[in-house]
Structure formats: C-alpha cells, structure tokens
Image: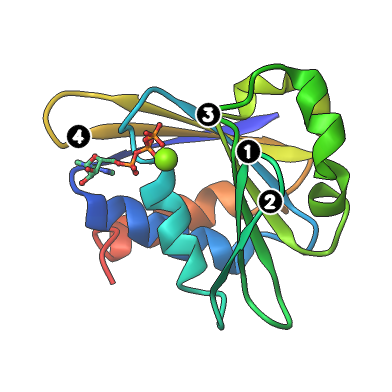
Amino acid sequence: MDQVEIITQSPEETEAIGAYLAEIVPPGAVLALQGELATGKTCLTRGMTRRFAGAHIVHSPTFTLVNEYGDDRRLYHIDLYRLGSEEELLTLGYEDFIETDGVCVIEWADRAPHFLPERRLDIFLEHAGGDTRRLRFENHGLLPATWEQQLTTTTEDHGVKE
Ligand SMILES: Nc1ncnc2c1ncn2[C@@H]1O[C@H](COP(=O)(O)OP(=O)(O)OP(=O)(O)O)[C@@H](O)[C@H]1O
Ligand SMILES: [Mg+2]
C-alpha cells in the first residue's frame, strides 16, 4: 500500500484533483471516498465527471441515487449516505456497477466495508480549518507505481488549478 497526502485550499483545487484522477484511473477502478459531511467528496467527484462526456442521471429503483456519466467510458457515482445496512446493497444490483469496466466512485464507502474490492483507491477527506481540506490517497494495487509522483507533481506544477 502506498499513499499520498494533498492539502487543498478551495473547492476548485479539490475539483482539479478529481479531474486529474479521472485521467489516471484504469477501467474498472473503484474509488472509495470516506470523510465527514462537507469534506469535499462530491466536489472531488464533480471534478472527475468533467472528464466523462454526456452526463446523465440514473435514479436507482430503491433509495440510493446513482449518477451515471459518460458514453464510451463510464463513471458511476454512488452515495451510500442513506444506506441502512450493508445487506440492503444486495437488493440494489450494486455488483452491476462495481464489476464493470466503468469507474466507480463511492461516497461514504465506509458504510459498506465488506463490499469493497481489495483492489481499489481509498480517499480519506478531512476538514483542516476554514476552506482547507486534507486528502489522503491510499493505493491498494490499483494505480501504477508512478502515481504518487504524478499526482504530487501535477498539483505542485499547476497549483492544483487548471
Ligand atoms: N478545499 C475545499 N475542497 C472542497 N470543498 C470545499 C473546500 N473548501 C470549502 N469547500 C466547501 O465544502 C463543501 C464540500 O461539499 P461536498 O458536497 O463536496 O462535501 P461532501 O463531502 O460530498 O459532503 P456530504 O457528506 O454531505 O456528501 C462545499 O460547500 C465547498 O464549497
Ligand atoms: Mg457528497
């Protein structure tokens, strides 16, 4: 397991990191986002969706909102905030999303720890005062060896802005 920590000072910076991540994650990637309310999980995801054309929204038949983006290359954005129990996931066709070539971003992933694949990118988000957020990325066999350098270099070079 290798990890990188990045501090952002604005929503735009967090979005820019998401946009960059979207370019380096492989097909079938699962990104497990964890962090308290308003730490920037959706913001990071929004940055990613900018790299997937043809956004449209798919409402799941039950309770969880699944946003689906992209045509050729898909991103599934799943929010488990309202998940009552892990068992509820079984009724949702959850596997349909995580076992595809699409990229799957899961907010509140800690609500379903047993359903996360071993091979994934964990992203922990924390408040660090005002508009500062601390983002910690933990790679569990998903990204190629150069990812730490790529991510930190990009954010330093561009001030994580585009
Ligand atoms: N550095 C930053 N990165 C991301 N968001 C920031 C930052 N600074 C301030 N914000 C603000 O924090 C809020 C983050 O909201 P967002 O919906 O992304 O959080 P979330 O983690 O998805 O919350 P929830 O758990 O409710 O889904 C936004 O209002 C955003 O403008
Ligand atoms: Mg959110």
Q: Secondary structure at mark 3?
A: loop
Residue 110 image position (x, y, % from top left):
62, 21
Q: What residue sits right under mark 4 in the picture?
A: 132
The residue tagged 2 is: 60
The answer to whether residue 118 of the structure is visible from this angle is no
Q: Is residue 93 above or below residue 35?
A: below
Dots 1, 2 in contact, CB < 8 A: yes
**Residue picked out by circle 3:** 81
Q: Rounded to the nearest whole Å, what is the CA distance between mark 1 and mark 2?
A: 7 Å
Look at the numbered disc 3 and say if its residue's Cβ is closer than 8 Å to ligand 1: yes
Instruction: Kindly report which numbered mark, 3 or 4, lies closer to the viewer in this rendering.
Output: 3
Name the residue beneath numbered marker 1.
63
- Circle nearer the N terminus (4, 1): 1
Which quadrant would residue 52 be assigned to in this image?
bottom right
Where disc 4 sits, the SS reads loop
Q: Of circles 4 and 1, which is in front?
A: 1
Residue 49 is situated, as x and y percent measured from the top left of the image, at 50, 66
Residue 140 placed where, x, y %? 74, 35
Indicate which disc, 2 or 4, sits on the residue closer to the N terminus. Answer: 2
Distance CA(mark 4)–CA(mark 1): 32 Å
Task: Indicate yes or no: mark 4 CB to ligand 1 under 8 Å.
Answer: yes
The residue at the point 77 percent across, 25 percent down is 88
Above or below 146: residue 9: above
Q: Earlier in the sequence, mark 3 or mark 1?
A: 1
Residue type, numbered disc 3: Tyr
Count neighbours of disc 1 (C-alpha within 10 A) and say few if under 14, some if 14 to 19, many if 20 or more: few
Cα distance between the residues tagged 2 and 4? 33 Å
- Asked whether, in this view, residue 117 is left or right of residue 7, the answer is right
Q: What residue occupies the far left of the structure in this picture?
A: 130
